[in-house]
Amino acid sequence: MSDCACSKSIVLEPTSRPADAETLTVRTLGRTHFIGIGGAGMSVLAEILHERGVEVQGSDRELGPKAKRLQSLGITVFVGQQAQNVEGVDTVVWSSAIKPDNPEIVAAVKSGARLMHRSDVLALLMTSARAVTVAGAHGKTTTSAMIAHILVHGGKGDLADPSYAIGGSIQGPNGPVDGGHAGKGTVLVAEADESDGSFAKYHPEIAVITNVEAEHLDHYGTAEAYRQAFVDHAHHATGHVVLCADDEGALSVLRSMDADAASRAVAYSTRPLDEVGDVNGAMFVHIDHEAEAAADDGSASPEAVESFTLHMPASLHAAGDIPVHLRIPGIHNARNATAAIIAATLLGMDPADAAKSAGAFRGAARRFEIRGEAAGVTVVDDYAHHPTEIAAMLDAARRRFPESTIRVLFQPHLFSRTKFFAHDFAEALSKADDVIVTCIFPARERQSDYPDISSKTVVKAAAGVAHEPSGGWIESVPDMCQAAKMLAMRCRPGDVMFTVGAGDITDMADVMLCVLKTRTEDQQ
C-alpha cells in the first residue's frame, strides 16, 4: 500500500479514544512521540510524561523556545516531520492541528502504533492527579491561569507547585510566563476545550464552567447539543462543579444536573440568590460589588482596580465574607477570580489566602495587557474575538479609564464568525468612541468560501446601532498596518487605544507605540 493510499483511509477524530483506553496507564504508553511537540498544549504534556519516566520524543517544524527547553531536559526533538521519526515508537500523540496525510501519522498507522489525541494524554494524567478543568465559551484562559497563580503563590504542601496546561502565557512582573508547567505537586490545572467535543473524556475532581454561550455549532449542530455536552461534562466531575449563575447557559446546565451532582455544585453570581432563583440545591456564593471588598480593611494594594466581597456559605467555608482586590479590571474578571478562589478553597486552601494571591495576578497574556504608553496614550492588547468578550473588555475599559477616549483597532477572526455575528460585533464595538475594523484573520477558512464577507460587513451592520456621535465612529481599513498608523495619529494625550482580536493584530501594538513616539519627537 502506498503512503498516499494509506493516508486516504485515515480518519482523525478528536473525540475518538485508543482501543486500550480503559486499561492504559502512563507506565504502559511506551516510547511516546509528539507531533508538534513545541506547541503550547503539547510541550507541557510531553514534559509531564518525561518527569514520570516515560521515554518521550517529538518533532516540530522548527526549534522554538518550548522545543529547546524540552531538548535541555534530554528529550529528542526532530526538526521537520518525517516518517522515519516515528520508527520504533509505541504511541504517537497528535493535536487537532495535525492532518491525516501528515507523514508521521501515515507511518504510525502503517506500523500499528497507538494514536492518541492530546486530550487522551491529558485525560490519562488526570487519573493520577487532583485535576481542575476550566470549560466555557469565554474566560477559560484567565480563570485557569488564575487558579494556577493562586496555587503557585499561596498553596502549601501538596497544593504548591501545581502542573498546569493553559492556552496562553501569563503576565508576570518581568514579562510573560509560560502557560505550561510540569510541577511536583498533586494538582493539575487545565483548560477543557469544548470546541471539538474532546472535553467529554475528562473526569476532573473539580470542573469549572464559566459560561455556556452557544459556540462551535459546526461541531455540535444545535445549541441544545452544545448545552448537553456541558451537562455531561459536569456529571463527569468526581468532586465538585463550579458554575457562573450570571450566565443563563451555565444556569441552565446547573438546573439540568442530577440531584447528586447538583448537591456538590457551587454557583456564583453578582446577583443575590433571591434574584437568581432555582440553583438546584447547589451551594451559592454572592459576588457583592456594592460592598467593594470593605476597602478600608487594609488588604488592597495600590494597584487594585476591581474590588468586591464574596459572601460564602458556611457549607463551603466558615470564613463567611472574603474581601477581594484585583489588579485586572472588569466585572467579568470578578467572576473569573471568584471561580478561581472557589476552586482553590475546594482543594483545601483558606479562601482569604486564595483571595490575597488572586490580588497579585496580573492577567493572562493578551487579556487587557497594557503594552506601553507614549505621548500620553496608553496602548492595550486584548484577545477578545467574540461579541460578548469585546463588550466585557470595553466595559472593563470604561471602569479602568472612565475619563478617557477609547479607540479600538479590531481584527475579526474567521469569515464565518464575522458573517453570523456582524450586528453583535457592531453592538459591542459601539461601547468604544472610535473604531477601525481591519482585515479578517482567516485561520482555517478561505476568503473564496465567503466572497461577500469583509471588514466592511461589520461597518455596514453598525448603520442601525445607536452611538453618540451617531456617525463617523466606525470605518473599514483593510490594510492593518495603515489602520494602526491612522488610529495612532488620531490619538490625543489621555486616550486609550486597543488592539482587539485573536489573530496577528497583536503585532500592531508596537506599530502604534512607534507612531506615537515618533510623533512626540517630531513635535519637540
Image (cartoon, rainbow, N blue to C red):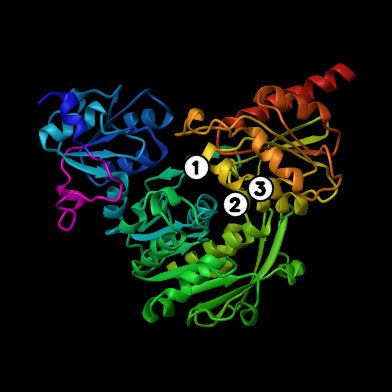
In the image, what residue type sits under mark 2?
A: Phe
Q: Is residue 228 found left or right of 22 in the rendered image?
A: right
The residue drawn where x is 56% and y is 80% is 313
- Give the x, y percent position of residue 144: 49, 54
Q: Distance between the residues labelled 2 and 1?
A: 15 Å
* Name of the residue lying farthest toward the top: 522
Q: Distance between the residues labelled 3 and 1?
A: 29 Å
Is the magenta region chiefly helix, strand or loop? loop
Quick check: is 76 in the magenta stretch? no
First along the sequence among labels 3 and 2: 2
In the image, what residue type sits under mark 1?
A: Gly
Q: Name the residue under label 1.
A: 168
The residue drawn where x is 37% and y is 80% is 260
Q: Give the range drawn in magenta.
A: 11-32
Q: Is residue 281 found left or right of 30 in the rendered image?
A: right
Q: Mark 2 points at which residue?
A: 361
First along the sequence among labels 2 and 1: 1
* 170 in relation to 399, above or below: above
* Crowdedness near tag 1: few (<14), some (14–19) or many (≥20) residues, C-alpha within 10 Å: many
Residue 12 position by quadrant: top left
In the image, what residue type sits under mark 3?
A: His
* Name of the residue lying farthest toward the front: 452
- The answer to which of 343 and 72 lies nearer the viewer is 343
Q: Is residue 505 found left or right of 109 in the rendered image?
A: right
Q: Quadrant of the C terminus?
A: top right
Q: Quadrant of the N terminus?
A: top left
Q: How far apart are marks 3 and 2 (CA)?
A: 34 Å
* Crowdedness near tag 3: few (<14), some (14–19) or many (≥20) residues, C-alpha within 10 Å: many
Q: Name the residue under label 3.
A: 423
